[in-house]
Amino acid sequence: MLNPEDDTIQPYTPLQFDDDGNIREEPASAPEPKAEISEEEILSRIKAREEEGLVRGMEKGHATGYEKGLKEGEKEVRKKLERLEGIIKELESFKNKRLNEVLPAMIELSLDVAKKIVHKEIELDRNIILEVARDAVRKVGEGEGQIIVKVNPEDYEVIAGGSEILREHAGVKEIVIETLATVAPGGCIIETGTGEIDATVDGKMKEVVDVIGTATNS
């Protein structure tokens, strides 16, 4: 049939009449039956939602616990660092105290070793006394007419043989060589008109002790 208001071709549907001649209406199409959900499917969906909620709860709890644990860990680390700093300070104090206690003994021991080494060198080379005396006479002030060099009897010959060299270095007219048993081998004492110059081994060691004492007390 053609619809005057619609020029599209409609499919032809034959009319049906009842016994009285009336047009029989087409029965409305029955609604499609809804798919039934089984009990197992329902339980499965419930279980899935429960598991999803459990996972979310665990994730939230894990995040909260992690943050709390991190703060507690940082607090514990700070405590350990403070204890460590305290231990370091105690060790520094102990070290300084012990150092002050043992330093004099260490210095004395070092000087004893140095003396032994020096005396050994002097025994091996008797001419060392000449070098010691030469350095000592250089300290003599100008204008001295005569100086006296006192040495150990073992060093007399070496000093006497180099007296002219010593006189030139001292810039004096005369040098007198004398022996003195209390002067250890390898050292000498210079007497001038204005004072005395101690160039003995013990005197040199005393100078070292004084320098060390000044340095440690400053």
Image (tube, rainbow, N blue to C red):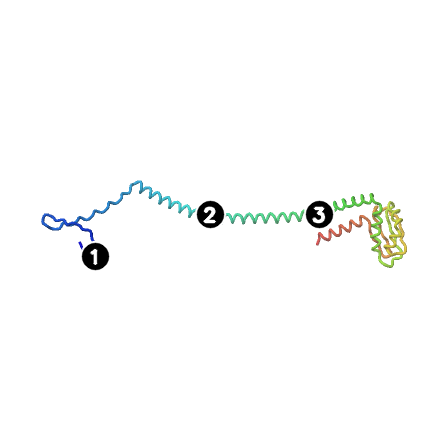
**Which amino acid does the dot numbered 2 rest on?**
Tyr
Q: Which residue is drawn at 72% across and 46% down?
A: 106
Q: How crowded is mark 2: few (under 14 residues within 10 Å), some or many (20 or more)?
A: few
Please report whichever mark, 1 or 3, sits nearer to the chain's N-terminal start.
1
Find disc 3 in the rendering and name its residue. 103
Find disc 1 in the rendering and name its residue. 7
Q: Distance between the residues labelled 1 and 3?
A: 123 Å
Give left or right: position of 209 versus 11.
right
Q: Distance between the residues labelled 3 and 2?
A: 54 Å
Find disc 2 in the rendering and name its residue. 66
Q: Quadrant of residue 144?
A: bottom right
Residue 98's disc number? none
Please report whichever mark, 2 or 1, sits nearer to the chain's N-terminal start.
1
Q: Position of residue 45 (x, y in %)?
A: 33, 43
Q: Where is residue 21 in the image (x, y as percent from the top left)?
A: 10, 50
Please report whichever mark, 3 or 2, sits nearer to the chain's N-terminal start.
2
**Which amino acid does the dot numbered 3 rest on?**
Leu
**Which amino acid does the dot numbered 1 rest on?**
Asp
Q: Residue at x 78, y 44 (%)?
A: 117
Q: Where is residue 125 in the image (x, y as percent from the top left)?
A: 83, 45
